Image: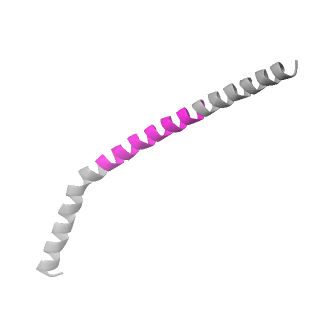
Amino acid sequence: MTQKDLERLATAEQAIRDMRGDIDAIRTDTAELKKTLNMGRGAFWAVGTLMATVVAGVAWLWDKIKHP
């Protein structure tokens, strides 16, 4: 390897070392976003189930009132 190649390699290695903190921060942010998404998904299903139960109850009540 020439001196120029060694300098380029050293520069690349330093750049990789410098990026490690940024990569760790991205991983942390991604993990937090996944947690938030899963909480949102759970809330969506809970609200959807509640709404379906209310609609079914209203339909049952309507049927009982219209056909005693």
Residue pictured at 63% horizontal, 30% vertical:
51
Left or right of 50 on screen, residue 30: left
View extreme (right): residue: 68
Check the image and report above or below for 42 versus 18. above
The N terminus, quarter of image: bottom left
- Against 16, residue 24 (above or below) is above
Is 63 or 34 nearer to us in this picture? 63
Q: Residue at x 21, y 57 (%)?
A: 17
- At horizontal 24% and vertical 56% (from top left) the residue drawn is 19
Relative horizontal placement of residue 36, taking residue 54 as reference (left or right): left
Query: Quick check: 5 left or right of 54?
Result: left
- Where is residue 39 shown, x and y percent of the image? 49, 35
User: What colour scheme governs how the chains and residues are painted in the rendered image of this protein?
Assistant: one colour
Quadrant of image for the C terminus = top right
From the viewer's perspective, is 29 left or right of 58?
Answer: left
Q: Quadrant of residue 67?
A: top right
Q: Is 5 placed above or below 46 here? A: below
Q: What's drawn in magenta, residue-wise?
A: 25-46
| In the foreground, 13 or 65 | 65
Q: Relative to the observer, which residue lies in front, 58 or 37?
A: 58
> Residue 33: within the magenta?
yes
Please identify the quarter of the rendering in which residue 64 is found: top right
Location of residue 7 in the rendering, given as x and y in whole percent from the top left corner = 13, 73
Q: Main secondary structure of the magenta part?
A: helix
In percent of the image, x 30 and y 52: which residue is there? Answer: 23
Q: Nearer the viewer, residue 1 or 11?
A: 11
- Residue 2 belongs to magenta span: no
Question: How many numbered dots are placed on residues in this image?
Answer: 0
Residue 50 percent coordinates (x, y):
63, 27
